[in-house]
Image (spheres, helix red, strand yellow):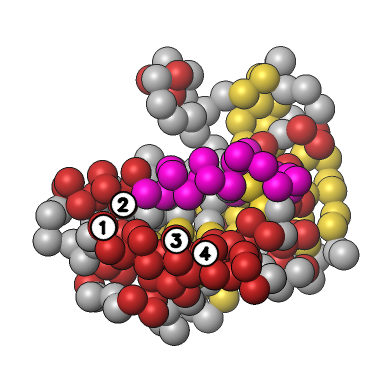
Amino acid sequence: MTETVETTATGAILYDKAIINHITEAHFATGGWPHAEVLTGSLRSSGRGNTLYVGNVPRQFVLRHYVRGGLIGKLIRDTYVFSGADKTRSFMEWRLLDKLAANNMRVPRPAAARYVRRGTLYTADLITVRVPGIVPLSQYIADNDPDESFWRDCGAAIYEFHAAGVYHADMNAYNVQIDSDGTLWLLDFDKGALRSPGPWQQETLGRLHRSLLKIVGLEPRLSFRSPNWRQLLDGYFDASRSA
């Protein structure tokens, strides 16, 4: 483990020296990189406009500023109550990703995280290594016509995360991503955790199902129908029975 924490005038930066051997607060803004582009996508896959690709190929990073969603996000955009550095969203997500990546789970490798205090509140940012060639599941089914084996493999891959106790707080068709080999990855582990088996496993599956139904409502021609969901569940439960 190569975790390093450096205090700043207003907070702290946590980073992996094996990935970034020197980092400053400038790296958490577009001007701190020779190249930066806003993540864009179709079918609302670009999120809340808070994510950037930074750096140059072949080593690119993803810079994400934490912003609130839902109704509270309309009132409070990007601040959270500070209750200690180890409990900031950025530090917690960095450390969870670090554990998962160390165990060869298909997640982005964390590079750096920071928080900036303003009195009792803080803002936060996270930098991860960009996984080349991945696209959101929403885009994948817009560009392809996946067969039964694809959906079964997706179900088995999700079970692999669940069997390891990996809770994803927002498993949807955007955070589920597919690489050039058709293999499933998970992104955005804000509020994620390691948990014992429980109802949360079915709840996260239900969240993904609702997300898929929602994007089909946006674009009915997408390659997703009821049999595909049954195929995903078949792959999930077949993997659980053979574990």
- Residue 233 numbered tag: 3
Instruction: Name the residue: 64% across, 73% down.
Output: 242
Q: Which mark is residue 236?
A: 4
Magenta residues span 189-209
Dot in front, 2 or 3: 3
Between circles 2 and 4, the one closer to the viewer is: 4
Residue 26 in view, yes or no: no
Q: At label 2, which amino acid type do we have?
A: Leu
Asked if 79 appears above or below 55 in the picture, the reply is above
The span from disc 2 to disc 3 (Cα, nearest Å) is: 14 Å
Mark 1 and mark 4: span between their CA atoms?
Answer: 16 Å
CB atoms of marks 4 and 3 within 8 Å: yes
Report the side of 171 relative to 20 (left or right): left
Residue 133 inside the magenta-drawn segment: no
On residue 226, the disc is 1
Separation (CA) of disc 1 from disc 2: 10 Å
98 or 28: nearer the viewer: 98
Q: Is residue 127 left or right of residue 229?
A: right
Rendering coords of residue 61 (x, y %): 55, 64
Decide which of 19, 168 is in the foreground and name it: 168
Q: Is residue 202 magenta?
A: yes
Instruction: Reply above or below: 31 against 154.
Output: above
